Every structure is written in structure tokens, then in C-alpha cells.
Amino acid sequence: MHLKAQGDLLAAQSVFEQTLEIEPEWEAAHFALAETLEAMGRHDEAVRHYVAHLRHADDDLRGASLKLALLGAATVPEKAPEAYVRALFDDYAPRFERTLIEKLEYRAPYQLRVVLDSLRPPISRGERILDLGCGTGLAGEIFKARASWLEGVDISPRMVAQAERKGIYDAVHVCEIEDFLARCTSRYDLVIAADVLIYFGALDRVMSGIHRILADGGLFAFTTQSGDGDGYRLGADQRYAHSRLYLEQTISRSGLSLNTCLSFVPRKEAGKDVAGDLCVLSQGNAAVTAPTAAEPAPPPEVPPLGRTRH
């Protein structure tokens, strides 16, 4: 791996091939060799080793199925593999907040809160809020002041452990989102999903689950990466992008109503703005008004990301 990291791909290829001569069923070596061959432009050989990796692995924690889809050797999965997402964020947890705030200029929770405040000001009794893909609690910090009850769910145990230490959630669960929505028996006034649906391609199960758990007049606010065409696509970053048409059609099938969908920038990647959409849906007859701007400045009562208000 050191040789590959240094860019000496031929040497790395040789090492991985020698390793597989000794341990032909070692799934990690197959994956490392596949990545090396892919970086060298030898895609057919890379596909062969990604397939071998999946054949010998107990799960897809390295995301080989996504790699195969991007190489055109498999259909695009409807969502990222659960084992892959869990491993990704368990590894990411210790540096997650610093990377997002300081390097990627992450702003999705801010903008969700600003748009929601303009659509429906916070009510005095507070709201029952569910934070999907809560991570370390960055969105929870932003929305705590609106909540009478704040609940979080995330697939990564290490992310959830960090969220729990902040003491801002009334309850937090380690669970895959679709599974949680299918089993949930509670009702919520507001459900938020900040930069979470980028790990889902098909959104029908998520939307129908939200429809089932939202209280009458409740709102679902979420962000996506912007896509073209009439569906969703898997990008080179191994995240999903959704077209506006796909969102509108999926929302229509779900029984929810689209209140607003705004273009915005959730974060940067490689120093460039990521194009995104911010949508707010309602259950039943939700009384909302149109926001005044797509990217207004955060209101004074919203604390900075990463600084919990107690």
C-alpha cells in the first residue's frame, strides 16, 4: 500500500500479485490490486480482481460493487453497501468535524435551518425532530433550539458515540436509515437529512418511510447533490446525484408534497463548490410560506457548526 500511495504503481502491482500467489483468496489483496490496475487504466483486469474480491469477502465494506458499477461492469446499486458506509464513517469519525468544517466548508445544516425558519418559524412548544444520518451531531447542534425532542439515527457506531457525548440528543440509534424508518413507531413534526441521501440512489423507500412517520402538517427537509437527466447517477466520488425530475417524481409517488426545492452549495470538494439541491416536503396541509432567498445569511440564533449550545 505504501508503494501505491507513493505513485509507484508498477511496484505495487508486483507486490500485490506476489501476495496473491501465496494467498489467492485474500480479498484485501484482490481489492488493492484492482485499485492499482484501475489507476493504471487497465480496467478489464481491475474488474476481474474486484469480482474476485467480492467472491472471497464476507461483505462489501470496501465498496467494490460501486467500483464495478463505475467501470460499467455491473448495474448501479440502488444504494451504497451498508458495510461500506459503516466502515467509511467509523474510520472518518475522529477527523469528521474538522475535515467538514475547516477543509470542506460544510454548510448543509446551516442552510436547512435557515430555509426552515423562513418557511415556518420555530414554535414555542418546540418540535419532535428526527435527524437522519446524524453523524457526530452537527445538524443536531443547529436544530436543538427548535426541538422539544431531538432524536438521531446513524449507521456508524463511532459517529453515534461522538454524537452521544455532546448530550444534545434525547435518543440516538445505531441503525441503517431504511431499516429504522420501516420499524419506527414514533411520529415527528420535522425530519432532517443533511448530506445523507448522497449514499442512496433510489429514494422510494426513504420517502415512503418518511410519509409513514411524519405527523400531519410535518416537514421533511433534506439535501442532495444535483444530477442531470431524469434519474439518479453514481459519481466518481462514489456518491449519488439526483436530478430534479427524479426528485419530483419520487416525491409524488410517496404521498408527500413538495414545498420548495432550492439550488445551494452544501460543501466543497477539491476546492470547488459542490452543486446541490435543498428540498422541503410536507405531510398533509402544512402551513408554510416561500423562503425569501436560496442562500440567506444564517440567523443569529443558529450556533456555529461544531459548537454545541447548552
Image: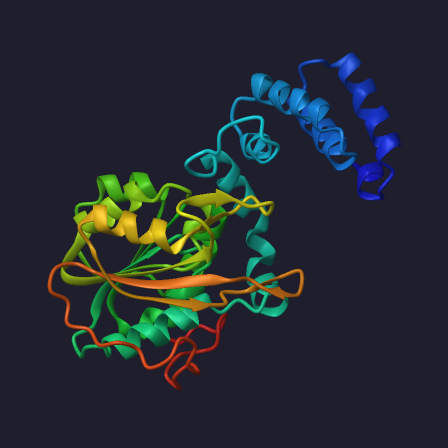
For residue 196, side relative to residue 9 (left or right): left
- The residue furthest front is 229
- The residue furthest bottom is 300
Q: Nearer the viewer, residue 174 or 56?
A: 56
Q: Where 103 sits versus 30, above or below?
A: below
In the figure, residue 263 lies in which quadrant?
bottom left
Can residue 166 be spotted in the picture? no
Image location (x, y in percent) of residue 173: 34, 48
Image location (x, y in percent) of residue 82: 45, 36
Image location (x, y in percent) of residue 310: 38, 75
Q: Nearer the viewer, residue 95 or 11?
A: 11
Image location (x, y in percent) of residue 181: 26, 44
In the figure, residue 26 lies in which quadrant?
top right
Identify the residue at image location x=47%, y=53%. 227
Which quadrant would the N terminus be assigned to in this image?
A: top right
For residue 55, side relative to residue 290 (left or right): right
